[in-house]
Each structure stands twice: as C-alpha cells, then as structure tokens.
Amino acid sequence: SENWLEHVRLGYNYRMDEMSAALGIEQLKRIDEILAKRQRVADRYKKLLSKIDGVETPFVADYATSIGWFVYVIRLDEKIKRDNFMRHLIDNGVQCRDYFRPIHLQPFYMTKFGFKNGMFPVTEELARRTVAIPFFNNLSEEEQQFVAHTIEKALEYN
C-alpha cells in the first residue's frame, strides 16, 4: 500500500501472536548465523554501491562492532529525482521504497502538535533522498549485482 508507513494515531502494540513467537524462538537459535548473513549482504552492497556517483551508502562508525541490519537504505544525490529513480528500479524488477518518512509529518503529529511541512527542513530533505533497496539474509551476489547495475542505469536516465 502507498501509505503503509502513515500513522494516524499514537499507539503501542507489544502483543505477539503464538506463530510469531514460535518463529522467533527458532530464529534466536541461529541468530549469529542470521546476523552474519545480513552483514555479508550489507558489505557486498557497500562494495558495489560505493563506486557509483550519486549514491551514498549507510554510514557505519569505525568503532561499531555489530549492526543488526534490518533494511538497507541508500541516499541519493540532491540532483536526482527520487520518484523517477524509483520508477526505473521498479520497472526493471528491483523493489524499492521511500522508507523513512519524517515523524513530524505523520498525520497524528501534525494534528496533535501542529507540525507542518517545512518545520524541519534537513529531516525533510534527507527523507526525500532516501530509498530502501532489496535486503534479506539470502540475497545472492548475482541479485545484488543486478540491483547495483539497475541503480547505475536509473542514474543515467535521471
């Protein structure tokens, strides 16, 4: 859905259904393996995408010893039209999303606190330039090369 990250009310839901709990228990038994696979995927993306002008990979501090990657978000150069870029990726078989929407522009916060577009220009600018690209444990090297190649082509047409 287009508005999957839109929040119209504030709330918390800490309940977990039994199936999710059972899955989580089993995954915890292999947590080191899962995290290592995700780190390999993130490392491959960094290597592939850091060569591409107009794309910035996630910052990782030198002192960081472990990251629990759950999504891989790239930042586009300010000259790139993100919607055109994303359309090219989608049209060529690469799923992507505009992942981080500024919290102050969520309907609940706008209504409750009177936040408006333009109040946090840096946040809004960064949000307009970010794109989440495919990321999961078993993403193959070939699939990542395809994503990187499609990103390069999208930048050429932008």
Image (tube, rainbow, N blue to C red):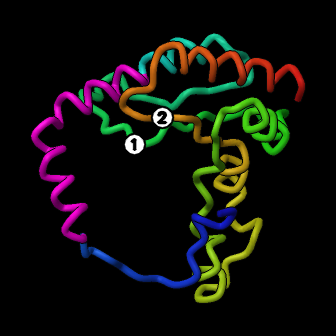
**Mark number displayed over residue 109:** none
Q: Is 90 left, or right, of 136 in this rendering?
A: right
Which residue in the structure is indicated by mark 2? 135
Q: Residue at x 45, y 19 (%)?
A: 140
Give the total of numbered labels. 2
Magenta residues, dominant SS class: helix
Q: Is residue 26 above or below residue 42?
A: below
Q: Is residue 103 above or below residue 81?
A: below
How dense is the environment of label 2, judged by Cα within 10 Å: few (below 14), some, or many (20 and up)?
Answer: some
Q: Position of residue 18 (x, y in %)?
A: 19, 68
Identify the element where label 2 is drawn: loop
Which residue in the structure is indicated by mark 1? 70
Q: Is 21 left, or right, of 136 in this rendering?
A: left
- Which quadrant would residue 61 be assigned to in this image? top left
Q: Position of residue 9 (x, y in %)?
A: 52, 84
Under mark 1, the amino acid is Phe
Front position in the image: 96 or 82:
96
Q: Position of residue 102 (x, y in %)?
A: 61, 61
Q: Is residue 6 above or below residue 109?
A: above
Do the CB atoms of the residues marked 1 and 2 lie less than 8 Å apart? yes
Q: Which residues are magenta?
A: 17-42
Identify the element where label 1 is drawn: loop
Q: Position of residue 131 (x, y in %)?
A: 64, 41
Q: Residue at x 24, y 70 (%)?
A: 16
Q: Is 78 left, or right, of 63 in this rendering?
A: right
Q: Residue at x 22, y 63 (%)?
A: 19
Q: Nearer the viewer, mark 1 or mark 2?
A: 2
Under mark 2, the amino acid is Phe
Q: Is residue 60 above or below residue 21?
A: above
Mark positioned earlier in the residue sequence (1 or 2): 1
